[in-house]
């Protein structure tokens, strides 16, 4: 299907155009927004009645008390002093207990500091002096396509020295989203500059994977940079060679060329999401933010050329490991972020086109669409677009699709609750979002983030909860879900082990990671020479602090075996979700989300036109 085949409500091809219209629109009242979630019935609110009864009873008792007793001024003063002393003593005791027995949110804060540190250990290229990972050094300084692209830098995806643009872009997008929503929390914890540096290290690399300085269009992107020791002549495909090559990235001293892709719409749309979301993070750095927006626009146009083709491994020459199973979720995801980054209504028209559901099947009630991951962005896009409906007033013609997306995210939140059977749980309580397949934790952390974030959205409009069918659930149910899942990961599980390296007393010792498992001893091990460290039964000589491993199986069992990556390998995408969930759950001032920064580029909306009249029936 060609791009012109999707048309907006007014007819004609839907193109991305410059937007300079502005106007004013009165936002719906809080009562109206609450009604979207509460679905009030035509009867008195029982809570309001109870509150009135309580106030009436309190007033009556106060009159009786005042009639029966007269209190002298001296008595009032004495009582006030005693009350102040008692309050002071209670507060001091609470503070003392808090110091001796840290609360659960303190665990989230500690884990957050560590989870961010993992990205320092994954850096490729010339490392900054502040990297602070003693066993890491400069690596792969010859990456690039000769005389065309400089591919030095970026992040290694997991336990090897490969760099994949797809999961790295998703990780950057999710980190950026968490910063936009919770920048005040990051700042209060002293991590705002750190996380912004992590994002910029990634976006700087992505800008080098295509011609980001082109005026209007590009023709290819780099999907990945792979390979270890070029002397390896073992049989098998590239993926098998990579897995059988156990070498420190610092010991790779030969040039590595990137795998270029000329037809990879989902990859390009995901890269556009990363740059567009990061442009909001760096909105105060005007030149860099504009550079990111321009790159995102180029990538989205490149992705849009192939929007009619189903995105599979055969449709592009990208990675054999990271291929999206569909394009339309990245299309929805990328278009949403570009609208927020630019305020250009053409992007909003794209992602709220009523035909999109029929063409892309993005609104199917497939349980997979409720699981946010590097491969499936439906749930993330639904929540992002629901944010527009909750905090802004779009009206016709956007309201219909925004309401549909909002309904989808409501159903997604319902599916996370244990009272429903959408997903199984292990006996230890871990939700099985990938249906018992390996590497479950990457999916769990994103669900925890979405649940906590949506609860903060609902709180921001002063609504106490949302509906699942005819049943009402308070937002505390979402927060409880997020807490229990993250608590499982940090140690509250049948094995009593933390799946974040360095957190707590018990955590994985044989992480599937080349740099962490090979000692930094000035000896250069080739692909085959390093296998002795992969197969060693001893703990890794280097602790990769903050790495979240792949996780247990569906029976809560975990094998701390270095060679089994299905249990012990960490990834960029997994840790980005962990960081997002932890900062959302952490306590601090101010609590809740930043409602406005997301919309910094969105201009005042024109007054919505009335909907078309109903057809005349004689």
Image (cartoon, helix red, strand yellow):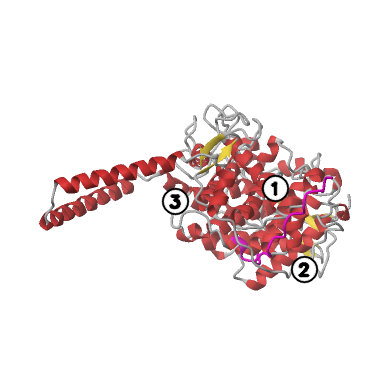
Q: Is residue 489 visible?
A: no
CB-based contact (under 8 Å), mark 1 and mark 2: no
In whole angstroms, how far apart are the C-alphas of marks 2 and 3? 41 Å
Q: Residues within 10 Å of mark 2 (few under 14, many from 20)?
A: few
The answer to whether residue 512 is above or below residue 270 is: above
Q: Quadrant of residue 145?
A: bottom right
- Return the disc, 1 or 2, that comes first in the chain's sequence: 2
Residue 607 painted magenta:
yes
> Left or right: 545 with respect to 345?
left
Magenta-colored span: 598-618
Q: Which is in the foreground here, disc 1 or disc 3? A: 3
Q: Of the numbered discs in the image, which one, if any, rests on residue 587?
A: 3
329 or 219: nearer the viewer:
329
Principal secondary structure, stretch drawn in magenta:
loop
Q: Residues within 10 Å of mark 3 (few under 14, many from 20)?
A: some
The residue indicated by pointer 2 is 18
54 or 572: nearer the viewer:
54
Instruction: Identify the residue at horizontal 71%, vertical 44% (top origin).
Output: 375
Q: Which is in the foreground here, disc 1 or disc 2? A: 2
Q: Residue furthest bottom?
A: 287
CB-based contact (under 8 Å), mark 1 and mark 3: no
């Amino acid at each position: 299907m060609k791009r012109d085949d999707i048309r907006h409500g007014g007819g004609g091809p839907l193109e991305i155009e410059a937007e300079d219209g502005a106007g004013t629109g009165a936002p719906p009242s809080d009562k109206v927004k609450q009604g979207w979630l509460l679905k009030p019935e035509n009867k008195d609110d029982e809570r309001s009645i109870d509150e009135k009864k309580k106030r009436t009873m309190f007033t009556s008792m106060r009159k009786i008390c005042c009639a029966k007793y007269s209190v002298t001024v001296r008595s009032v003063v004495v009582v006030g002093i005693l009350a102040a002393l008692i309050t002071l003593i209670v507060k001091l005791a609470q503070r003392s207990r808090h110091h001796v027995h840290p609360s659960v949110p303190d665990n989230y804060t500690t884990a957050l500091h560590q989870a961010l540190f993992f990205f320092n250990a994954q850096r490729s290229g010339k490392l900054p002096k502040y990297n602070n990972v003693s066993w890491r050094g400069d690596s792969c300084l010859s990456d690039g396509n000769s005389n065309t692209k400089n591919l030095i830098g970026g992040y290694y995806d997991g336990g090897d020295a490969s760099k994949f643009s797809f999961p790295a872009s998703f990780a950057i997008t999710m980190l950026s989203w968490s910063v936009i929503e919770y920048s005040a929390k990051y700042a209060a914890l002293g991590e705002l500059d750190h996380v912004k540096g992590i994002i910029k290290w990634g976006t700087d690399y992505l800008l080098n994977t295509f011609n980001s300085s082109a005026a209007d269009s590009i023709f290819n992107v780099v999907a990945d940079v792979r390979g270890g020791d070029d002397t390896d002549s073992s049989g098998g495909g590239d993926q098998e060679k990579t897995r059988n090559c156990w070498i420190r990235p610092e010991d790779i001293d030969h040039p590595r060329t990137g795998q270029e892709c000329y037809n990879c719409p989902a990859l390009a749309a995901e890269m556009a999401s990363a740059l567009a979301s990061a442009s909001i993070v760096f909105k105060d750095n005007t030149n860099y933010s504009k550079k990111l927006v321009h790159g995102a626009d180029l990538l989205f146009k490149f992705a849009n050329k192939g929007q009619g083709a189903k995105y599979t491994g055969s449709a592009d020459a990208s990675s054999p490991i990271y291929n999206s199973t569909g394009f339309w979720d990245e299309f929805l995801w990328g278009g949403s972020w570009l609208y927020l980054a630019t305020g250009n209504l053409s992007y909003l028209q794209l992602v709220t086109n009523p035909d999109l559901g029929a063409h892309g099947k993005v609104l199917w009630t497939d349980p997979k669409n409720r699981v946010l991951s590097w491969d499936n962005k439906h749930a993330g896009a639904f929540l992002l677009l629901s944010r527009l409906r909750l905090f802004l007033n779009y009206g016709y013609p956007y309201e219909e699709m925004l309401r549909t997306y909002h309904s989808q995210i409501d159903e997604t939140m319902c599916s996370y609750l244990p009272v429903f059977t959408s997903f199984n749980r292990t006996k230890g309580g871990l939700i099985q979002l990938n249906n018992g397949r390996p590497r479950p934790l990457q999916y769990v952390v994103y669900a925890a983030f979405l649940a906590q974030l949506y609860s903060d959205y609902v709180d921001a409009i002063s609504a106490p909860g949302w509906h699942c069918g005819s049943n009402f659930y308070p937002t505390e149910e979402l927060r409880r879900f997020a807490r229990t899942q993250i608590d499982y990961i940090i140690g509250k599980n049948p094995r009593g082990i933390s799946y974040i390296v360095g957190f707590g007393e018990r955590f994985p010792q044989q992480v599937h990671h080349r740099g962490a498992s090979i000692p930094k001893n000035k000896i250069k091990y080739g692909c085959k020479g390093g296998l002795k460290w992969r197969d060693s039964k001893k703990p890794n000589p280097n602790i990769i602090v903050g790495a979240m491993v792949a996780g247990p199986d569906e029976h809560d069992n975990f094998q701390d075996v270095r060679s089994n990556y299905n249990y012990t390998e960490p990834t960029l995408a997994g840790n980005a979700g962990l960081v997002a969930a932890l900062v959302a759950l952490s306590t601090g001032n101010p609590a809740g989300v930043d409602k406005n920064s997301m919309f910094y580029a969105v201009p005042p909306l024109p007054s919505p036109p009335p909907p078309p009249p109903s057809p005349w029936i004689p």
